[in-house]
Amino acid sequence: MNLFDIVGPIMVGPSSSHTAGAVKIGYVARKLMAEPIVDATINMYGSFLATGGGHGTKYAIVAGLLGMLPDDRRIPDSFHYADEIGMKYRFGEADLKDVHPNSVQLILEGEDGRKLEIVGESIGGSLINIAQIDGLSANFSGDYPTLIVHNLDQPGHVAEVTSMLSHKAINIATMQLYRASRGGNAVMVIECDQEIPKESIKWLSHLEGVEKVTYYSLLDGGNEEDELS
């Protein structure tokens, strides 16, 4: 336990779970998209849906999708900034099962046509869990550089990915493997201690049997203050 577990995060808003956590879910989703978001369907669930209005949860999620962090003073005006840059957004009710009460389903489209569906959970104290990506389990925190590889459930893919990481001197912090069915769709979720080079991610995406590669980086992807001012 550290000091921030006791006093809470530095943030704008009344709630570490309903506001700060919601911002972080949106922020991680934007980083996973790796391009500006032009359209967002935001389906709320549980406590997010029932009590989020008083905590500014809707503003918080949109703020994160715009690239704002939990301490950004512009969070209460996130709708204005989204409208200003032409990002479309709408809210609904999510039909989810076996998720945390503070959950949201994000159905996103980027400016280059990329599509991404994410289920994020705010688990308290601004901590989050990205529970699903494109309908498959993920379960990562957003605290480490994270590689998500969607592939066919075939021999050799895990070895290809881990060999690449070893070659680049990247240490694996955690690794999770999921599959929808034997021989069907599978996913690797790998949290790393170091950032993965872009060329390595591009190389993975071209491997036979790999259907999609998504990467969450901790590096700053650009000056959001300039973009939204």
Image (cartoon, rainbow, N blue to C red):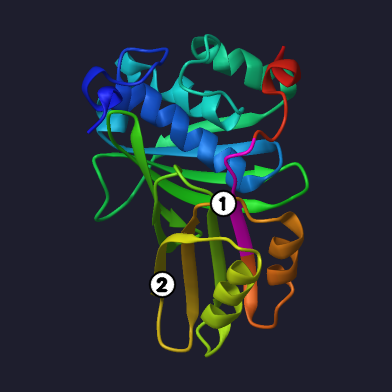
Foreground tag (2 vs 1): 1
Front-most of 158 and 151?
158
Front-most of 94 and 163?
163
**Label disc, if present, on residue 194 of the rendered structure:** 1
Q: Position of residue 159 (x, y in %)?
A: 55, 82
Residue 220: quarter of image: top right
Q: Quadrant of the N terminus?
A: top left
Q: Which residue lies at the image location 64% right of the left edge and 22% below the top edge? A: 82
Q: Is residue 205 magenta?
A: no
Q: Position of residue 135 (x, y in %)?
A: 45, 62
- Eyeballing the image, is 189 above or below 159? above
**Residue 220 appears left or right of 58:** right
Mark 1, residues whose alpha carbon is within 10 Å: few (<14), some, or many (≥20)? some
Q: Is residue 218 magenta?
A: yes
Q: Quadrant of the C terminus?
A: top right
Q: Which residue lies at the image location 60% right of the left edge and 57% below the top edge? A: 214
Q: Amino acid at mark 2?
A: Leu
**Label disc, if present, on residue 106 of the rendered structure:** none
Q: Position of residue 218 (x, y in %)?
A: 57, 40
- Eyeballing the image, is 211 above or below 154? above
- Point out the stretch of residues depicted in magenta: 213-219
Of the two numbered discs 2 and 1 on the same chain, state the one appearing first in sequence.
2
Q: Secondary structure at mark 2?
A: strand
Q: Secondary structure at mark 1?
A: loop
Mark 2, residues whose alpha carbon is within 10 Å: few (<14), some, or many (≥20)? some
Front-most of 167 and 221?
167
Q: Which residue lies at the image location 48% right of the left edge and 47% below the top edge? A: 144
The residue under label 2 is 177
**Residue 94 appears left or right of 5:** right
